[in-house]
Image (tube, rainbow, N blue to C red):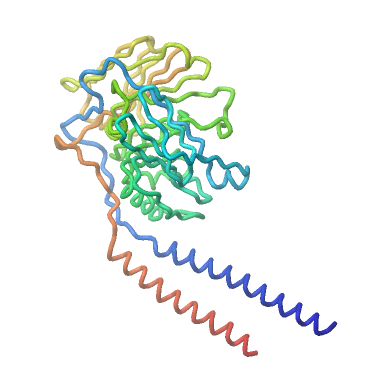
Amino acid sequence: MMQQSQNTSGWSKIIIRLFWAAFFGMLAFLTIFYLSAPFFSYEKPQAFSGAHIHSPYPAVFPQTTVSLSFDLNALHLADLLINGKLRTNFKFYDTLSNTTDKIDISNFQFMHRYIDNNNDKLLIYRHGYGLTDDQQLCFGAKKVVWTDYPFFQDLRHKQDIIWKLNQTSYLVALTDPGRSYTADELRFLSGYQLIELTNTDTDALKVWDLVLSHGHRANLLLSNLSRSQSLNLEEQKIHTVQLLINELNINQLLECLANGSYYCLSRPESVVNTPSPQLQQLVIQNDTFSLGINKPASEIRLIGQDGRLLKKLADTNQLNYLMRDTDTYIRAEMQFTDGSQLFLNPVFRHENIDFKPQSPAIFDTDKTALMRGIYTVLLVLLFMIIFRIFLKRARN
């Protein structure tokens, strides 16, 4: 019996040591992974400025527009762990045609494939599998980026992720950035082209204005959460993107999203089958901002630098506004009596005829190499100390 007890005790010690070895091994890996993240230096972000005024909208609108909804059914890892729900779509390709009005993104960290009538291919996926709320939507992806910082992220970790996604995808959207990015981070982060919002609350729109006020060109993309993810089912809104093209194909879709040649429409579910409001004109001539819609809005608002209200009109379908030198950008939002809302992408100033996006984040090669060297030396010394402690205990 004593021999059996000693054997059991021996096995218990082995299992405990293996557990702690695995724990410290994983801890060491995560420590090295986090510490080895690249460093960036940041220039002070500048607000839009210059004599040139850029409008993303064509001088002549197409006779018809393509209405497209982005439905996001992909669940975050935390949701999967809590709710135990996993929905995937492993079809080789879904068809994107002129009659298609929905892009249903069900896959998380896996490509969702679309093909149009020209046999052009579009690969989309949602990135971010950690326990934080950081998520990005990638359009025109070449491959899935599996790098993520699962437990916490500071500015350099978030910039590293965006930088990697921007290298492998045509367009990158930050999803509901108000939940996972601080105001200071949004001032400096660059490398993305879209702000994806799943609601039109005032706080969510303030985040968009924060980004625009610091000179980052980011177009708005309204997406729909699935019913299981929506927090407000009584006032469920349906969001659509109105592309200013006559015919839907993947190249034009990506071009519209990149250029901002579309507008977003948010409507209560109860009125989606009724005629929708439509943008009919947006022109800038002699610094005069002019827009027209097909039906009177209960209110039209122009928003500018730092989210300031520049002009507001009620019960009208037209608005004219003389842009001032201090107007760095202007975006318009319209409210209708049936609860519908219409959001335009921003018109903004720039220095040269060809607009070049600013990039405050600059990869700091010297600091990255120096800090990685220092971390390596410190970790080697730490592991030597730990090894000697375990070795001394084993001898005793």
**Residue at position x 36%, y 34% in the image:** 115
x 38%, y 42%: residue: 138
Who's the residue at 31% across and 16% down the image? 64
289 or 387: nearer the eye?
387
Give the x, y percent position of residue 100. 40, 25
In this rendered view, identify the residue nearer to me: 280 or 122. 122
Task: Decide if residue 25 is on the left or right side of residue 116.
Answer: right
Residue at the farthest right position: 1
Residue 309: percent from left, percent from top: 35, 25
In this rendering, is residue 305 above or below 238?
Answer: below
Q: Residue furthest bottom?
A: 395
The answer to which quarter of the image holds residue 300 is: top left
Residue that appears at 40% across and 39% down:
113
Quarter the C terminus occupies? bottom right
Q: Quadrant of residue 207?
A: top left
Q: Quadrant of the N terminus?
A: bottom right
Say if 314 sits above or below 52 in the image: above
The percent position of residue 137, horizontal first and vertical second, equals: 41, 41
Q: How many marks?
A: 0
